Amino acid sequence: MNELRFAISDRLNDGEVGPKHVPLSLLGDFQKDVTEFLRGSVRDIDASEVIVAIEEGSLALVASGLLATATLWADLDRLKSSGSLNQIDPKRAAVIERWQAASHQNPHRKYRIAVPRAANTGVSIDSETNFRRDEEVWVTVEKYIHGRVLDWGGKTKPNVHLELDDGTVLKVAASQTLLKQEKQNLLYRPTLLHITAQENLFTGALRNPTLLAFETNQPSYDEAEFQEMVKRGTVAWADTPNATQWLEDLRGGRA
């Protein structure tokens, strides 16, 4: 999937809203909401790279160039199947909430997000929909997070600013003792942190992260070493016609 169609329907002075008949404020708000929905919190879409076509009929924007964003398609599937806003990106959830509030105030206002020319792929928002936020559940966890240290230190509230692999920045509280004990200069370097935090059971979001330790013995991947292992393995198994069958025979055959 590479395209997504965003449509808004409404009536203005007894006429249907469309490309040739739309209040400037409504057009501006709709364009801003579509941009926010596409980008989400992780911003895995560069809005400047997205091409938009304006369709006739209701006011509709068809965005193309969306192959790279796995989170967008996953959020649409969750929204359609569960109706829970807790399970999708918070930025996208906020857009759906705004659209739903507008539709509940105006029965003529309707929104739809769908894949063009694909049946049963869309999500509609109107005066009858009830997308909701379930009560949030936060649990205390202890985990390892990987990222790049952008900043660390602080006089009264020392912390580590860690850029995660998805581009978001997590501020992790730390003690002066832990920061002082770290002998390596980790600034702008990939780092593994051992932390405690509260994790949202619905979204996986973290809050109040606190540093327990820097993990200095991090596993690394060496492409050259891996290829050398593959080469040695290929030579070692060269005289075995069917390695899979040999392994099954060694295990005593299939059950």
Image (tube, helix red, strand yellow):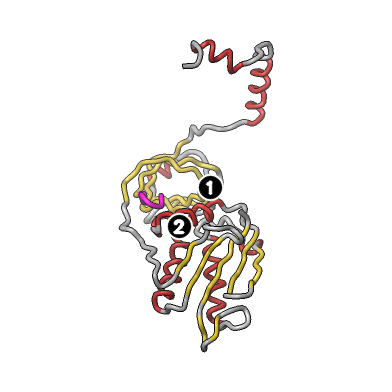
* Residue 147: % across, % down: 51, 45
Residue 100: x and y in percent read: 42, 70
Query: What mark, if any, has residue 165 been given in the picture?
Result: 1
Find numbered disc 2 in the image and state the secondary structure of the residue it sits on.
Answer: helix
Q: Which kind of residue does numbered mark 2 sit on?
A: Lys
Prevailing secondary structure of the magenta residues: loop
In the picture of the structure, the residue carrying the numbered disc 2 is 80
Q: Mark 2: few, some, or many residues within 10 Å (few <14, many ≥20)?
A: some
Q: Nearer the viewer, residue 160 or 231?
A: 231
Question: Upstream in the sequence, badge 2 or badge 1?
Answer: 2
Residue 202 shown in magenta: yes
Write the residue at 43% across / 75% down: 102
Camera-nearest label, 2 or 1: 2
Q: What's the magenta region? A: 199-204
175 left or right of 185? Answer: left
Residue 131 is one of the magenta-drawn residues: no
Q: Nearer the viewer, residue 92 or 226?
A: 92
Does 130 sit above or below residue 219?
below
Residue 233 lies, in percent from the top left, at 64, 18
How far apart, in angstroms, are the residues tagged by discs 2 and 1?
28 Å
Task: State the residue lying farthest toward the front.
Answer: 119
Judging depth in this view, the residue of 238 and 62 nearest the camera is: 62
Q: Secondary structure at mark 1?
A: loop
Q: Which residue sits at x=31%, y=46%?
A: 140
Residue 237 at x, y percent in the picture: 65, 14
Amino acid under label 1? Asp
